[in-house]
Amino acid sequence: MTTENELGEVIRDLTEHLQYLKELGVSGLGVELDAAAPDLAGAPVRIEPSISPATTKPHFTSEIPDLKPQSQSRPAPRPAGSRLAELPSLKTRKPTNFFDKYNPREEEREPLGGSQGAGDRSGERADQPPSITVVPEHADVTETIGEIHAEIGPACTRCKLCELGRTQVVNSVGNYNADLMFCGEAPGADEDRLGEPFVGRAGQLLTDIIEKGLEIPRKDVFIGNINRCRPPGNRAPEEDESSVCKPFLMREIAVVRPKVIVTLGATATQNLLETRTPIGKLRGKFHDFMGTRVMPTFHPAYLLRDPNKKREVWEDMKLVREYLRSK
């Protein structure tokens, strides 16, 4: 059973709500808002509602403002294709030769931290985005392997290896129209002495892989290195040394356009593919390099130290052989 005090609390709350509605401007609910007695804690209070017999629902007499936002005029829809028409045409973009992309001329190189602003480059305005060069699928090569070797010169001094005990520059050799290319990291002692890549013990093993495994004469493939000078102690080429020599290899690849490049060892693979992934995770499958398939595998010198890896190299070469025969 509801006590008088509880009923008083209910009446008190109801009165406060009714008073709040009155302050909002609601003047008619069919209930007399002033009927509440001032003393609600004592004797029971009775409120005499004055509800019209014809009205069963509360009737609000106050006007509530229309809060619906006014409709705003919308711009006329753009015709289809108008945004696309505002974009710059691709026909105005000038293709760049493959070898120019990887070996820009000295006068075209922008110095690091140079003082020229964005608007001073190639006559471009500062408020215009830089033009985008597109490398064509088939490079428009206008040079030859002989011209590349002549540019390198017999006594190249472009990196510090020229002062660290090298005997001579070791250029790439083989068929300039080969479907298959092999790429190592740098010449060894025998290569530095004879001036030809892969002529020592590791080179003899590579010859067996080519002629006995792939059944291709060695003279029909193209063989080169990331670097053309022997690093001291047969160490791997350092980054500053490779960055100077690698562009010449890129230009050779553009001239020869082999169908498959076999990279020998981690250094050659990581330099060509520009990755730090270990050779063990890269080998056994083809990778793409500018539209040419690349098969990483172990270096022949590594196979001389661990003959057990020859089986894995043979699995790699079978994939190469099957691919070349299918083309």
Image (cartoon, grey):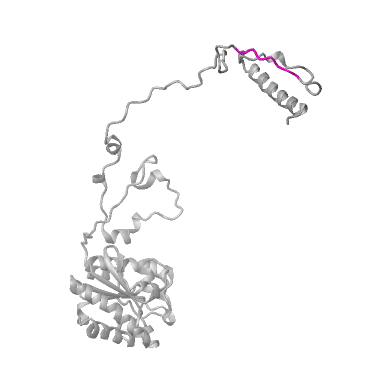
> Is residue 129 located in the magenta-colored stretch of the structure?
no
What secondary structure characterizes most of the magenta part?
loop
- Residue drawn 50% across the image and 18% down it: 66
Image quarter (top left, top right, bottom left or bottom right) of the N terminus: top right
Q: Is residue 191 above or below residue 252?
A: below
Q: Quadrant of residue 147?
A: bottom left
Which residue appears farthest toward the right when viewing the image?
Answer: 42
Magenta part of the chain: 45-51
Residue 98 screen position, x and y as percent: 27, 60
Residue 87 screen position, x and y as percent: 30, 40
31 left or right of 184 in image: right
Q: Is residue 105 above or below residue 209?
A: above
Q: Compare residues 232 and 203 and report the one nearer the observer.
A: 203
Examine the rendering and report whether any part of residue 232 can be seen: yes
- Residue drawn 42% across the image and 69% down it: 277
Examine the rendering and report whether any part of residue 158 can be seen: no
- Residue drawn 26% across the image and 42% down it: 89
317 left or right of 109 in image: left
Q: Is residue 322 above or below residue 4?
A: below
Which residue appears farthest toward the front when viewing the image?
Answer: 1
Residue 65 screen position, x and y as percent: 53, 17
